[in-house]
Structure formats: structure tokens, C-alpha cells
Image (cartoon, grey):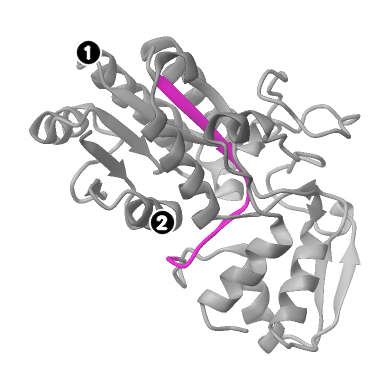
Amino acid sequence: MRIAVIGANGQLGTDLMAALPDAIPLNRADLELTDPASVEQALRELAPNLVINTAAYNLVDQAEDHPELAFAVNRHGPASLARWCAKQDAVLVQISTDYVFGGDPGQRSPLVESDRPLPVSVYGSSKFAGEEAVKQLCPQHFIIRTCGLYGRAATKTKGNFVNTMLRLADERPELRVVHDQYCTPTYTQDVAAQIALLVRKGGSHQFGTYHVTNAGKTSWFDVATEALRLAGKSTPVLPISTEEYPTRALRPAYSVLNCDKIQSVTGQKIPHWEDALARYLKEIQVT
């Protein structure tokens, strides 16, 4: 199988390349997702029969002010990939997000793949539009919804929540972190492992949408507290409400994803978020 990974130098892309070592890496210099001609040329030359798209515009607050750019990357880009894959009888794996949910204030149980998406931000709406484009244009597709990714390839300019908390703990006398948004921040290594198993199994009966996060339910406050504890940092972490930390874009109050479907197909249990966080900190040599 000839696999191309778009966004190969990102956090998830890096771990996908490790999980699928024969895959061909594609970055922005190789393929401009917002340019259909660039997509066509890059994929025509490589002729993959499976394309994994990890690229996205994921600046959640900035998306509120730049919706055209968010939709260009998160909707129109996947649409171009889907058209090419459908034409070439190739498979497309599109990475999506828990932010396609959030519009049901009464949600209190883990969301399954068939639950109705109700995004509450431009970012979430653009990612859902990308999902819909892939479904409509490419019969052979996998849509992977995940949450709060953190991985070893984080950079200073585009880091992740865990690294940010560790940095701020060294810069501030205390941290104030939202405690009433429930989700499951996820280690990219664990997502990559599930995707690799899924695409290797193949089979048309397995195409569709999958939720892939670490196990368990938590809040951003709990993740920050645990990260600092594991890192041996004594900076106090104070819980605050969403109202006390206003942001340009709304966030889901509850977006815990049920991952039973992917585990039943791959046969591999996804580790708990606490285990994943401990492994991540050990691998980046914090603990």
C-alpha cells in the first residue's frame, strides 16, 4: 500500500510517520492544501492509494476573525483531496475534532459517532464542513475525530496545552485553568497507533467515522494539575469557570468521545489519559 501523510511534520503527522514508516511525508512545501492544482499535481506524481490528511487550520480563536481561511483549509482542502481520491479509487483518512460538538448544553454522556454534530465555533463548523465534504465526495473514507492533541513534535510557535502549562508554571506564581469543560486531551502516539491498525485492516465495511481519544473523562484543570505533579513543579493550579476565562471562540462544555467503535475494529484498547500523559512527559524527559 502506498500511503501519503499530509502534514507529516506536525504532532500527529510525526507519530503517524513512525507508525507507518513506509509512508511518504508531505508538508506545505510539497502540497498547498488550499490550492486544488497543487493537490492534484502532488498526488498525481506520488500516486498513493491511501492519503492521510492531518493538516488543519486549528487556531480556534483566530478562526472567528478569519472564517474564510479556516474554511479554505478545513473544508475546501479536504474536498480537493476527496475528489482526487474518488477519481483514483484511493482511500482518504481525514482527521477531525471533538469541536464538531458542543451545541447541546445538556450533554453529559460520551458522544458516539452517530450523535448529531452541533459546533459552536467557526473552527468547529469548518471541520464539520470538511467531514461532510469527504463523506459526499469520497466513498472510501475514514473520518477520525480526536481531541486536544499533544505530541513530541510540538514547537514553540505552535505548541500544545501540556507544554504550555509546563512553561507557564516556570513563569507565573500560579496558574488559573478552566475546570468546567470536560473532554479527553490525547497523546498523538496513541491516535497514530489506532489509525495504523485501522488502515492496515482495510475492508470496505469498515469505512466511516471513528472517535479516537485516550480513555477517561477529565477537565483542562485536572490535566494541568496532573502534568505539574508528574513534572515535580509546585506552582499552584487554581480552578476557574469558563465565564472567568472568556475567549473569542466558544468551546464545548462537554465533548468526551466514546471510542468503543474503533477499539472493536482494531482490537486494541486505547490507554487512559493519565497513562498517556505520564508516558508523554517521560518521553520528552520532563519526568
- Report the mark closest to the observer, 2 or 1: 2
Which amino acid does the dot numbered 1 rest on? Answer: Lys
Q: Nearer the viewer, residue 6 or 123?
A: 6
Q: Residue 87, labelled with which disc?
A: 1
- Crowding near pointer 1: few (<14 within 10 Å), some, many (20+)? few
- Left or right, 156 with respect to 219, comes to left
The answer to which of marks 2 and 1 sits earlier in the sequence is 2
In the rendered image of this protein, does residue 264 appear above or below residue 133? below
Identify which residue is drawn at 59% across, 32% down.
262
Instruction: Name the residue at the left extreme.
Output: 45
Q: Quadrant of residue 168?
A: bottom right
Magenta residue check for 232: no
SS label for mark 1? helix
Residue at numbered disc 2:
15
Q: Where the N terminus falls, by quadrant?
A: top left
- The magenta region covers 141-153
Q: Is residue 273 visible from the viewing direction of this image? A: yes
- Which amino acid, mark 2? Asp
**Apparent side of residue 111 relative to residue 50 in the rendered image (left or right):** right
Residue at 79% x, 34% y is 110
Quarter of the image for residue 163 reads: bottom right
Q: Secondary structure at mark 2?
A: helix
Instruction: Answer above or below: position of 185 versus 131.
Output: below
Residue displayed at 42% across by 65% down? 153
